[in-house]
């Protein structure tokens, strides 16, 4: 072994160095951000001495606290709803055959491909038109706010949940549901006792993905938001445009921490479900695949938050 | 046969333009071990799936113990299935897998426990009750699948190539075990397989299928000894198929012009196919005394293959194909070398006339 490392060719060492540089490029900004969030100075780029001053400011700032609360409400609502609808969509695409399925299948994933800005504009236009129509017919005036933000998040999250759950379903032996039916289970019992437990890693993965996407979203949210319903990412974005204050560093670091926690939870979940299913079972080989893209995404979220 | 366990009348199943099962009539008796035998794609699995309720017939009626099934879903049918892939629930233990059917039918939990233990004893897997399916070997999984179905004491057990994934030795052991089990529990077994040996050794009766049609139904002996069609003859075991023309009552003319005796071959002038099992043929030296009334064809050994328990000879006799002859490997049976002149000899009663 030692001999192998000693005589390692130059190419290998260059590749290793390259790898380290890539990681440096990824993580140096995060380190800088985190360090400067503990800086006791009103100017962003000038280091004086360590302090928790900006974290204190953050907790005392009502706007930020309200934004955090809004963010959590929207994330919770949109995650729960999109997990239910996305899972149902995945099952109907994977397990049933019906007219127009191919078209619906393609359209289901459109929100993943559509640019955020396009999605945002169409959401805004849709809500404005719908509210005008509603007012015309009933006289009730609805306004943009947490409701519209949640609906918009649900709209794009369903697609992501469906993709992740479907990957899991595709790896499931279709005879399992037949076996359950053969053993006297009603369709509902089959779903509860067999299908749902087996796709649970996918459902959980989809939920985490939906949660992060919702926590992270700026573009769509800033279009469909109303007075008093600003979310944290949108607030931070606005803050940057007004004044570059070290407060942003503290808020960004807090968001980064939340993202890392989510990654940890998802990794823990994967490991647990992986251990439970056993590595030898070929039917379960995709257990980790379904959740892998999510971790990649969470990593990106962390980097995004750090970049702010 | 008392009251039939399963009756299929005029069952047809179409998938789009494809006819998977074509106007099939079949009655399986109570307590019978019935095999559906045929090559892949012959419609045997589709037939089984219709009995289980996973597919519904396009036409025809299907009755289980006299009751018409119609569009009744699988969970309301008195049958259980052993799947080719076993389809064990990977997130449940062996015991939970086996208990599933009883739980669904709301059997009291004390009774479930007792019955699960009993059936796991039967398949000798009591010690693996808490294992997950992924921790079991192929043979053990197969036995769990069997136990999971049997614990429900179904009126009919459907088995879809349950031994297909096992290696040869294990498969042979399981064949014996399955047959004994069926004798013991007395449940009707409908067994789908493409393995003719499996069908012959286990079944009370066999139905041979090809291209969605049921070609012949009979006991293993009837199917093996008296195939009625070229397909059945060819599919089950080794066989010599010889084309001949009927030249008189009990006489046919072979391709080489020789006339031989065949019992009731059909109307004079008609072309027929003769089916002859290799083990019914015997080889003699040219000058050896031979049975008086046997058919004799002179030929030359062109290939000899050693199978341990027997020799297989290909003998060129001037017909379209050489004749395959099986001679047991016993000290009193003479062996022949490549190129040796010989006489192929058989009892006319061993010849079967089959349709194309």
Image: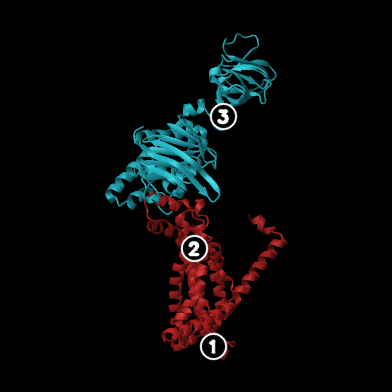
Query: In cyan, which chain?
Result: B
**Residue B267: percent from the left, percent from the top?**
57, 23
Q: Is residue A37 above or below residue B198?
A: below
1 vs 2, front mark = 2
- C-alpha distance separating marks 3 and 2: 52 Å
User: Mark 1, chain letter?
Assistant: A
Nearest the viewer among B34 and B209 is: B209
SS for dot 1: helix
Q: Earlier in the sequence, mark 1 or mark 2?
A: 2
Residue at image mark 1 = A239
Q: How is the image coloured?
A: by chain
- Choose between A277 and B296: the one closer to the eye: B296
Q: CA distance from mark 1 to mark 2?
A: 39 Å
What's the residue at 55%, 72% (across, down)? A111
Is residue A223 left or right of A192 when viewed as pictured?
Answer: right
Residue underneath mark 3: B355
Residue B95 picture location, percent across and down: 37, 48
Give the residue number, with chain letter if any, for mark 2.
A90
Label 2 crowd (10 A; few <14 / some 14-19 / many >=20): many
As helix, strand or loop, the secondary structure at mark 3 comes to: loop
Residue B290 horizontal/vertical position (percent): 59, 10
Left or right, A234 with reference to B181 = right
State the residue in front, A258 or B9: B9
């Amino acid at each position: 072994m030692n001999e192998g490392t000693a005589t390692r060719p130059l190419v290998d060492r260059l590749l290793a160095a390259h790898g380290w540089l890539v990681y440096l490029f990824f993580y140096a900004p995060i380190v800088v951000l985190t360090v400067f969030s503990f800086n006791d100075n009103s100017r962003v780029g000038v280091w004086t001495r360590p302090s928790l001053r900006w974290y204190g400011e953050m907790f005392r700032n009502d706007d930020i606290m309200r934004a955090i609360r809004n963010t959590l409400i929207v994330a919770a609502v949109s995650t729960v709803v999109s997990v239910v609808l996305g899972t149902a969509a995945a099952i109907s695409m994977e397990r049933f055959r019906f007219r127009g399925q191919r078209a619906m299948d393609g359209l289901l994933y459109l929100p993943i491909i559509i640019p955020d800005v396009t999605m945002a504009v169409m959401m805004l236009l849709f809500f404005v038109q719908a509210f005008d129509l509603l007012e015309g017919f009933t006289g009730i005036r609805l306004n943009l706010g947490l409701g519209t933000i949640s609906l918009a998040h649900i709209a794009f999250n369903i697609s992501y949940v469906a993709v992740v759950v479907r990957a899991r379903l595709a790896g499931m032996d279709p005879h399992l549901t037949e076996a359950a039916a053969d053993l006297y289970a009603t369709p509902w019992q089959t779903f509860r006792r067999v299908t749902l437990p087996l796709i649970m890693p996918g459902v959980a993965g989809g939920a985490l993905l939906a949660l992060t996407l919702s926590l992270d979203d700026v573009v769509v949210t800033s279009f469909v938001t109303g007075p008093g319903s600003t979310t944290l990412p949108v607030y931070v974005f606005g803050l940057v445009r007004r004044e570059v204050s070290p407060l942003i560093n503290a808020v960004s670091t807090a968001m980064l921490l939340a993202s890392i926690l989510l990654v940890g939870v998802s990794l823990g979940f994967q490991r647990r479900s992986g251990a439970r299913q056993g590595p030898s079972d070929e039917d379960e080989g995709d257990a980790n695949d379904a959740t892998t893209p999510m971790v990649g995404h969470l990593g990106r979220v962390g980097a995004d938050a750090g970049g702010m | 046969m008392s009251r039939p366990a399963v009756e299929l009348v005029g069952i047809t199943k179409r998938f789009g333009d494809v006819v998977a099962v074509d106007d099939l009539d079949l009655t399986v008796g109570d307590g019978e071990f019935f095999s559906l035998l045929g090559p892949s794609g012959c419609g045997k699995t589709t037939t089984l799936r219709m009995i289980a309720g996973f597919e519904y017939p396009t036409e025809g009626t299907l009755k289980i113990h006299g009751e018409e099934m119609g569009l009744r879903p699988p969970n309301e049918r008195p049958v259980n299935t052993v799947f080719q892939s076993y389809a064990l629930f990977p997130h449940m233990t062996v015991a939970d897998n086996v208990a599933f059917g009883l739980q669904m039918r709301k059997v009291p939990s004390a009774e479930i426990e007792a019955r699960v233990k009993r059936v796991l004893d039967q398949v000798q897997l009591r010690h693996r009750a808490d294992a997950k399916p992924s921790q079991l070997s192929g043979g053990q999984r197969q036995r769990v699948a069997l136990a999971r179905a049997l614990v429900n004491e179904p009126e009919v057990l459907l088995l879809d190539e349950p031994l297909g994934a096992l290696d040869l030795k294990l498969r042979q052991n399981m064949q014996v075990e399955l047959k004994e089990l069926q004798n013991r529990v007395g449940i009707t077994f409908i067994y789908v397989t493409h393995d003719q040996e499996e069908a012959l050794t286990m079944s009370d009766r066999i139905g041979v299928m090809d291209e969605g049609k049921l070609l012949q139904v009979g006991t293993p002996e009837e199917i093996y000894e008296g195939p009625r069609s070229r397909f059945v003859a060819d599919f089950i075991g080794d066989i010599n198929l010889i084309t001949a023309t009927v030249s008189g009552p009990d006489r046919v003319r072979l391709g080489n012009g020789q006339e031989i005796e065949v019992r009731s071959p059909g109307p004079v002038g008609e072309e027929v196919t003769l089916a002859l099992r290799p083990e019914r043929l015997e080889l003699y030296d040219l000058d050896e005394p031979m049975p008086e009334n046997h058919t004799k064809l002179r030929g030359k050994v062109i290939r000899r293959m050693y199978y341990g328990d027997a020799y297989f000879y290909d003998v060129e006799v001037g017909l379209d194909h050489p004749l395959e002859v099986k001679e047991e490997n016993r000290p009193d049976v003479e062996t022949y070398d490549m190129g040796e002149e010989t006489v192929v000899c058989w009892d006319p009663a061993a010849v079967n006339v089959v349709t194309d």
